[in-house]
Amino acid sequence: MNSGESKLTVIQKKRDDGLYVWMSHSGDIFKDRDGNVMNIPAVRNDITAMNKILKAAHHYGAPDGKPHFVPGVRRVSDMEYSEQIGRMKEGYIPSETDLGAWYDAQRSYQKHGRNYDD
């Protein structure tokens, strides 16, 4: 193998569920003072959701931009976020709904067993 070549292939998943966020022309995502991202849960190409975030962006004085779809993500409340941080600090999978992480953990357990780091 030549240097610079990689055995890794990244496959982008084409999820149709996710969030629309407001992205400025400079590529910045619109957030409030607390860092919360303005978002609308939607499916890809949801015209109604795009119109809602457009109206919200104008209402809140967001810079010129456009709706931007972020696939495979969902809203998380402050309480759920706090719980996820706690789970992560305890060594657990942060989100109990992250099926990909559960699948990877199961594969790792099957391959390495309970004490794979010994």
Image: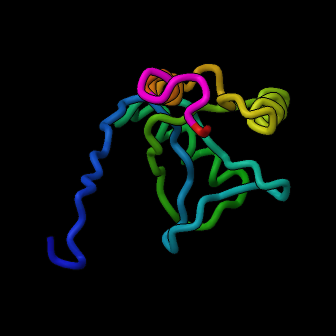
Provide the residue span drawn in magenta: 108-116
Tell me the quarter of the picture where residue 6 sits.
bottom left
Q: Within the image, what quadrant is residue 53 found in?
A: top right
Residue shown at 84% from the left, 58% from the top: 33
Residue 37 coordinates in the image, percent (x, y): 68, 49
Residue 26 vertical position relative to residue 82 in the rendered view, above or below: below
85 horizontally vs 115: left or right: right
Indicate how the structure is coloured in the image: rainbow
Q: Nearer the viewer, residue 51 or 32?
A: 32
Which residue is located at x 58 percent, y 66 percent?
Answer: 28
Q: Residue furthest toward the bottom?
A: 3
Task: Answer left or right for 53 relative to 33.
Answer: left
Residue 11 in the image, given as x and y percentages of width and height? 27, 46
- Residue 55 x, y percent position in the rendering: 59, 45
Residue 22 vs 94, above or below: the answer is below
Q: How many marks?
A: 0
What residue do we see at 48% from left, 29% from top? Answer: 112
Report the side of 11 relative to 66 (left or right): left
Is 113 colored magenta in this rendering? yes
Residue nearer the viewer, 47 or 103: 103
Q: Is residue 17 above or below residue 36?
A: above
- Which residue ends up furthest to the front in the rendered image? 118
Q: Is residue 71 magenta?
A: no
The quadrant in which the C terminus is found is: top right
Quadrant holding the N terminus: bottom left
Q: Position of residue 45 (x, y in %)?
A: 35, 36
